Amino acid sequence: MQQSKITEYLEAVSQQIRWKRAQAPVLEEIRNHIAGQKQAFISEGLNEETATERAIAEMGDPFVVGEQLDRAHRPRPDWPLLIMTAVMLLLGLVIQYLVGLNIPLGAETFGRQLAWTGIAILAMFAAYFMDFTIIGKYSKGVFFMLCAITIASLFGEKVRGSSTNTLYPLLLLSPVSLPLISYGGRALVTNMFLIGLMLSVFRTGDLVRDKAGVGATAVNSSHFIQ
Amino acid sequence: MAIDKSLLTGSTTMLILKLLDGTDMYGYQMIDELSKQSNNVFKLKAGTLYPLLHTLEQKDLLTSYEETADNARVRKYYRITKKGRKHLHEKKEEWKTYTAAVNDLLGGAGFATV
């Protein structure tokens, strides 16, 4: 009964903290604090119920506290990965340009690479801001769909006897990144999409939100107690 | 010398850093010590303390580590860093300048000493 009041308070706090990964340790610290404060009140002679209530009151408004904690725990973008990506993209363009100087239709090829780079950057941001938990939710569906596309692409257009289109869905199936430099437009877009996803995971927490442990502690314990 | 815009959070930061300059502490202990050492003038709300501690930790002014207390409860202790000490020093100077100026304005040389 007394525990559930504390759990309720923690839940209210946790709802304000948007970065799920930060929640568990923060809530644990606050839970400990309330427990310590409660013990102190009890040893001052208060009964358990009053001690719990006073300890929670001492903590302050859960929404205000949660909001302040949210501000302290803003996930930051993964700058190294972003910078590396930008460097690779630029390097790819430079190489395409230099190669283009010496071959016929070089300028056209470079122009196409430039356009694909633009599309790729858009794909990256799309993946970055997408709610990627969908992938976790429908992981099996996504997997089989990718398998189907890969197999279907085997029967598509062939270049010198090989199914080049198979490469792109395969890239999503097993994220082994091809260099951003020389594989052309569609590989670039696929890669940048994956990088966007990675950035997004770094920014917001885990791929599967409901997994026990991260952020779910408060919710779980409330189920057990009530 | 430039004075921190938010005097209140600024001075709370200073007090926390000063506390930790002596010894590592956990949150509850800080509130306790602060009110003891200030004759109950500073009653810091826990809800204010933790967000502040976490912000200071992200700014690398503090680090934290966990330690199991005798009753098997894990406590999160905070320790001041080198950068934190430097920051404390700056804050102190800032505070002295500010309070000296206020005291000057209010008049009475007796107030001016910090």
Image (cartoon, coloured by chain):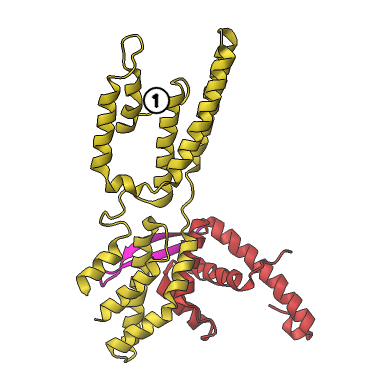
Chain colours: A yellow, B red
Q: Using the image as rendered, state which of residue B100 and residue A193 is in the foreground.
A: A193
Q: Please tell me how many numbered marks the rendered image carries.
A: 1
Q: Which residue of the protein is positioned furthest toward the bottom in this rendering?
A: A45
Q: Is residue B105 above or below residue B84?
A: below
Residue at 50% across, 32% down: A119
Q: Which residue of the protein is positioned furthest toward the left in this rendering?
A: A224
Residue A209, image x, y percentages: 31, 53
> Residue B85's quadrant in the figure?
bottom right
Chain letter of disc 1?
Answer: A
Residue at 33% across, 59% down: A215
Q: Is residue A175 above or below residue B16?
A: above
Q: Is residue A179 above or below residue A10?
A: above
In the image, residue B71 lies in the stretch drawn in magenta: yes
In the image, residue A63 lies in the stretch drawn in magenta: no
Residue A152, image x, y percentages: 27, 25
Residue A43, image x, y percentages: 31, 87
Side (left or right) of B90 relative to A156 = right
Q: Label 1, on which residue?
A: A178
Is residue A147 visible in the rendered image? The answer is: yes
Majority secondary structure of the magenta segment?
A: strand
Q: Amino acid at mark 1?
A: Leu
Q: Using the image as rendered, state which of residue A35 and residue A64 is in the foreground.
A: A64
Q: Using the image as rendered, state which of residue B101 and residue A24 is in the foreground.
A: A24
Mark 1 is surrounded, within 10 Å at the Cα level, by few (under 14), some (14 to 19) or many (20 or more) other residues, namely few
Indicate the quadrant containing the C terminus of chain A: top left, top right, bottom left or bottom right.
bottom left
User: What span is colored magenta in the figure?
Assistant: B64-81
Q: Secondary structure at mark 1?
A: loop
